[in-house]
Image (cartoon, helix red, strand yellow):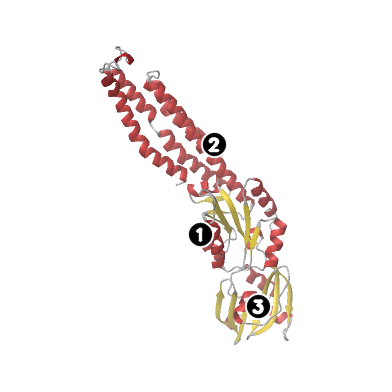
Amino acid sequence: KAPTERFITRFARFYTPAVVILAFSLAIGPVILSRIPFFTPFFSHEESFSVWIYRALIFLVIACPCALVISIPLGFFGGIGAASRRGILVKGSNYLEGLSNLHTVIFDKTGTLTKGLFKVTNVVSCNGFSKDELLRLAAEVEVHSNHPIAKSISEAYGKEVDENCVEDYEEIPGYGVRAKVDGRSILAGNDKSLHKENIAHDTCYVEGTVVHIVVDNMYGGYIVISDEIKEDASTTIENLRRDGIKKQIIVTGDSKVIAQSVSEKLRMDGFFAELLPHEKVEVVEKLVENKTHKNERIAFIGDGINDAPVLARSDIGIAMGALGSDAAIEAADVVLMTDELIKIHEAILIARRTKVIVWQNIVLALGIKSAFLFLGAIGFVAIWEAVFADAGVALLAILNASRTIG
């Protein structure tokens, strides 16, 4: 349930017994007070006990909280339906309302801000290895990997790889992969993997993802793989900023050079680069803990299997569904089914519109009922008017809630 729904549930828990007590007091209170000499002038002799019973019944009819307890959940249900029609799966009313209170949006880079369609753009070999040999070794060691980078290397190699020659395959999250190919130990990984293995190499200042190749602890060179920023990324970032999102941050396992380049092109508010999966979680946890207001929400948007822990830790986890891994989609609270980044902005607009309509219903129901309760208590409301204040207001609230579907 959304916080607003929980508030209405708690409110009804106290509201219902309160109005029953008030109605009972309205029925017998005036009768008792009219017999006390001090209060006698304030009551008409024509107002019998049956008159006050009638007014108390009218009071009870008006006070029925149907308009609130029906229209509020219906409003959120309609908002979730409206989002699903636009290819946005929201897994609960609480996440829909959370989207309306977003303060910070954290983006994973690969597959989220970028297309995730990698292409080998350069191969640099050294220590006696040829470019073709380096590409072949990379394709062989990556043969069991489902990562987009591995697929791009296989496509660049363009030949069939004998899987039987690959043994002891190991995927190291945040670093790369390792295996034995024809008896030789091959490591394909990022700069951190080389530091971890104490492999001497030159620092690469290139724009793109760099995959280093190590053969039997000898550095063989590196492969540069490039990705493109999505066409709607810049528009999405600008729309979010215009609509009040205070911070937009990139977190990525790629180098600072790549992260800074993407951040500057999209005019982001900051970036965290060269992060392992658990370090991404730590960044999100720190941002969540340092929120200045309890109603602020922090969203993380990602698509990879390594993003699942971060998606689960953020206030609202948003997964890119089309290219996203099953683990990321399972851990997410919101799933964008088409991988269009602009859908994030659409989801926020739907959430805000839903919240406005829900609060319209709360004000409408409480406002009209309060007025009719007062008039009913002093005898200015007939039973048919009480029925309108109950069923009529409930119908109006339901009709207003149905606007969320559109």
The tag on residue 403 is 2
Please tell me which residue is depicted at 66% across the width and 73% down the height of the picture: 154
Please tell me which residue is depicted at 70% across the width and 82% down the height of the picture: 133
Labels 1, 3: front one: 1
Q: Is residue 253 visible?
A: yes
Instruction: Please report whichever mark, 3 or 2, sits nearer to the chain's N-terminal start.
Output: 3
Report the residue that reaches farthest toward the top.
46
Amino acid type of the residue tagged 3 in the rendering = Ala
Report the residue that reaches farthest toward the front.
38
Crowding near the residue tagged with mark 3, few <14, some 14–19, many ≥20 C-alpha atoms within 10 Å: many
The quadrant in which the C terminus is found is top right
**Relative to residue 292, is residue 112 drawn left or right?**
right
The tag on residue 84 is none
Circle 1 sits on which residue?
A: 313
Real-space CA distance between mark 1 and mark 3, rounded to the nearest whole angstrom: 34 Å
Please tell me which residue is depicted at 54% across the width and 64% down the height of the picture: 282
Amino acid type of the residue tagged 1 in the rendering = Arg
Q: Relative to residue 11, is residue 53 depicted above or below?
A: above
Crowding near the residue tagged with mark 1, few <14, some 14–19, many ≥20 C-alpha atoms within 10 Å: some
**Relative to residue 21, is residue 86 drawn left or right?**
right
Amino acid type of the residue tagged 2 in the rendering = Arg
Q: Relative to residue 356, is residue 139 depicted above or below?
A: below
